[in-house]
Image (cartoon, helix red, strand yellow):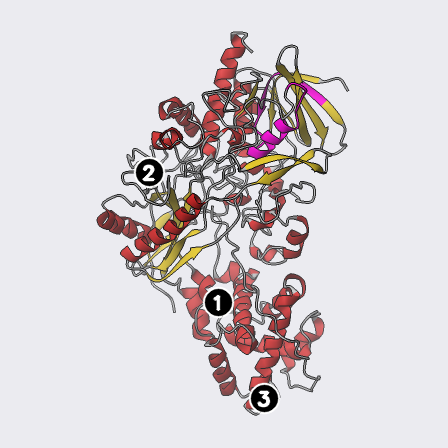
Amino acid sequence: MAPMTYDAIVVGSGISGGWAAKELTEHGLKTIVLEAGRPIDPAVDYVEHVRPWEKRYRGMRNRKQLERYQPVQRHTGACDEYASKFFVNDLDNPYSTPDGKPFYWIRGRQVGGRSIMWGRCVYRWSDLDFEANAREGVGVDWPLRYKDLAPWWSYVEKFVGIQGRKEGLAHLPDGEFMPPWELNAAEARGREILLQKFGGERLITNARLAVITENHLGRQKCHLCGTCYRGCITLSYFSSINATLPAARKTGNLTLRPFSVVHSVIYDPQTRKATGVRVVDGNTKEMFDVNAKVVFLCASALESTRILLNSATAEFPNGLGNTSGELGHNLMDHIMDGGAVGTLPFARDKREVGRRPDAIYVPRFRNVKTKQKDFLRGYGFEGRAFRQGWERGSEMSGFGAQFKRSLIGDLGPWQMDFGGFGEMLPRHENHIEIDRNLVDAWGIPALRINCAYSENEKKMQEDMVVTAVEMLEAMGATDIKPYKEDNPPGLVIHETGTARMGRDPKTSVLNGHNQVWDVPNVFVTDGACMASTANQNPSITYMALTARAVSYAVGQMKRREL
Amino acid sequence: MRRREVVQFLGAALALPFIPRRAETAIKLGEALHRRLADVPFRTLNREQQALVTNIAEMIIPETDTPGATSVRVPEFIDLILTEWASEDERAPFLAGLADIDKRAATLGASGFVDLPAAKKTELLTALDGARDDKTGAGLAFARLKALTVYGYFTSKVVDQDILKTEMFFNGYQGNVPFTPAV
C-alpha cells in the first residue's frame, strides 16, 4: 500500500501523545496519531461506578486470569477486577530481565494510554531539581532551568485544570490552581501540629491533582466517586480521552489510527532526516509506512527508545540517534513503599462526605536546607487521613449483633498514612537493549531491561520510614505501623530516561527542545527524555515539555529549518 | 499512587499436613438451612462444612433488624472464593482449620460445632477470635471466615445499596461534618 502522508506523526496517544496531537493540530498541521492499542469509548469502557456486587469476585480481582495473562501487570493495584482491561496482556508484550534483577514494566496500550489509569498528581520542579546533576556531578546537566519551563507549565496547567493550594515554597513552586478541596478534619489538625513541631519544614498540604473542582472547558467538576483510575464519565480528571484528543479533533486536522503498532522510524541518509515510520497493523499484522515532515515519539519512555533502537541503520548501527552511545541508558523510576500508618487520637466526632481520589502531600524536606549524610536528593509523601468504616471488621475483635451494629453505624478512628516517593539517580548501567531472541505478538524485537535500585535509593527508603514515624508520633498517633517493601523498580510506573536531554550531542540523545541531535525532525517528548527524575510525579512535566517542543518544531518548520 | 494489594484475606498461610475430612455423619440442621442448601450448588464445602461455615458466618453477622450473613448469601460467596480464587496452599489450611473447629467442639462434648448449645458456641468463637493471629488450625480458619464474612456481607448488593446507601455523586467535598456513631 502507498504510504499515507501527513504533516506530522505522533506515536502514542497517552499523556504526551495527546498533548503533541493537540498542539500540532492547533498549529494547523495535518497530524496522524498512531496508537498501538484499541479505541476507548467512555460510555462503554469507563467503569468507575461499577459496584463490587457486579463483579464475580466482588473486586478481589480475578487472580487466576491475572496470573495467566498479566503476571507482570498484576503487581500494580489498579490492575484489578474493574480496570485490568486497561493494562496490557503480558503474553503479547514480552520483555526480558537478567536473573535476579526483575523490573516491573506496567503498560497501557489503548487510545489514551496510561492517562486513563494515572495517579493524577501534578507537581512542578524547581532549580533545586534542574541543577542537581550539575551540582553533584551525576549524569549530565539539564539543558533547562525553571524559567525555561515555567511558562509551559502554566500553559498546560490552565488547560488541564488542577486543584491545589498555594504554599509559596521555593522548591515546590505553585502552579495555576483551581480552588482545592478542604483538608479533612484530621488532616487539618495534623497540618497544624506539624507546623508547630517542625516549624514549617514538614508540611501537610493538599495533593495537587489534575482533577477539576469547577466546570472547565466543557468538562464537569469532579463528583467525588473516588475511583478515577477506572475512567470518568463526567471527564473531570485530565486524560487524553477526556481533554487533549477531543481538542485535537475539533481542529479538523486529526487522524487517529488505533491498532497501529510502530515498528521503527524510517531514516533517509541523503537528507539525514526521518521520512516517517514503519507500522504493523495490530489486527492484520500487515506492515505499512506513514510519511511526514516531523515525527513525535510519545510512546512512553521505554517504547519510544525501543522504536529508536529498532530503527538502526548502517550509519546508526546501535540505534537511530545514538551517536552518543547513551540511547537506552540511564533508566530511572522513583522509589516508594517506605512509610508508616498510625491511629490518630483526634477528630472522632467528624466525618467526610465525598471520596477524594487523593488527599495530602508532604513536600520534600531532605537536602533542601540541610544536607543528609547518607543520601543525595529527597522524597515527598503522599497520604491521607481516613476512617476505615466496615473494612476494619476483619481486624476488629468481636462478633455478633453489637459487632455488626458497630460496623454499620461507626467508622472507626482516623488513621493517617504517609507513603514516600523518592528520587532515583540516573546511572549508566541501568539500561535497556534489544533482546535478539524475543519478539512481541507483532513480530517486533522486544526489550531486555537491566535495572536495579542503588544504595542511595535504599538509604532514602529507610529514611522515609523514620520520618513518617516521627510525623505520626508528633501527631500523638498510636498503633504506628512502619512499612518498607523491597519491590523491584518499575512498579512506581514513573519509568523515565533512556534518551536523555543534554547540552552536548556527545553525551546526550536529545537537545534542549527534545529534538534528536542526530535526526532533527524526530522529537521525543515522553519520559524517555529525562536527564534526572526529581521526586515529583512526572506527567505534568512531560506535558509542558511536549507543548514546548511542538512550539519549537513548528517555528523551525515555518522557517524551513526542518 | 498507592498500589498495595488491597484485599489479601487468604494470604499465604503455612502449609498444613493434610487432615482428612471427618466421615460423613448425620448432623442436625435447621429446616431452613436444609431447604437453602438443597438448591445451591456448593463446590468446595461439603454439607458438613457448609453447615459449619453458615453457622459461624451468621454468628459473626447475625440477622437483626437488618439482614444477616446467610440471607445475603455469604456462605455461597465463601465457597466461590475457596473454589475459584484461593490457591491450594490457602484452601487446604482453611479446610483443615474448619475440621479443627469441629475437633474443638468435640472436646466440649458435641459431635461438631453446629451441635453445640448456643452458649458454648459463643464461648468457642470468643476463644477463636483471640487466636486470629494463629498460622494454622481453628484460629486461622476463624480469621479467614471472619474476614470473608465481613467482606462478603458489606459488598453484597443489599447491604451496599439499602443499608450503606453508597452514593456515587457528591456536590463537592466536605471533610469536617459532625458525626455521632449510631451503635
Name the foreground residue: B54 vs A421: A421
Q: Which residue is mark 2?
A: A165
Please tell me whether mark 2 sits on a helix, a strand or a loop: loop
According to the picture, the residue beneath numbered tag 3 turns out to be B106
- Amino acid type indicated by mark 2: Arg
- Label 3 CA crowd tier, 10 Å (few <14, some 14–19, many 20+): some
Label 2 with label 1: CB-CB less than 8 Å: no
Residue A11, compared with residue B39, is above or below; it is: above
Q: Is A308 contained in the magenta span? A: yes
Are discs 3 and 1 located on one and the same chain?
Answer: no
Indicate whether residue A488 is drawn in magenta. no
Callout 2 environment at 10 Å: few (<14), some (14 to 19), or many (20+)?
some
**Measuring 29% from the left and 45% from the top, which residue is drawn there?**
A202
C-alpha separation, residue under disc 3 versus residue under disc 1: 27 Å
Percent of width and height locating residue A165: 33, 38
Dot 2 or dot 1: first in sequence order is 2
Q: Which residue is mark 1?
A: A394
Give the letter of the chain under mark 3.
Answer: B
A351 over A561 or under it: above or below: below
Q: Which element type, helix, strand or loop, lies under badge 1? A: helix
Task: Answer above or below: position of A88 versus B100.
Answer: above
**Image: magenta residue range:** A289-315
Secondary structure at numbered mark 3: helix
Residue B58 spot, x, y in % from top left: 54, 75
- Foreground of the two, A140 or A266: A140
Figure check: A280 above or below A342: above
> Visible in this render: residue A112?
no
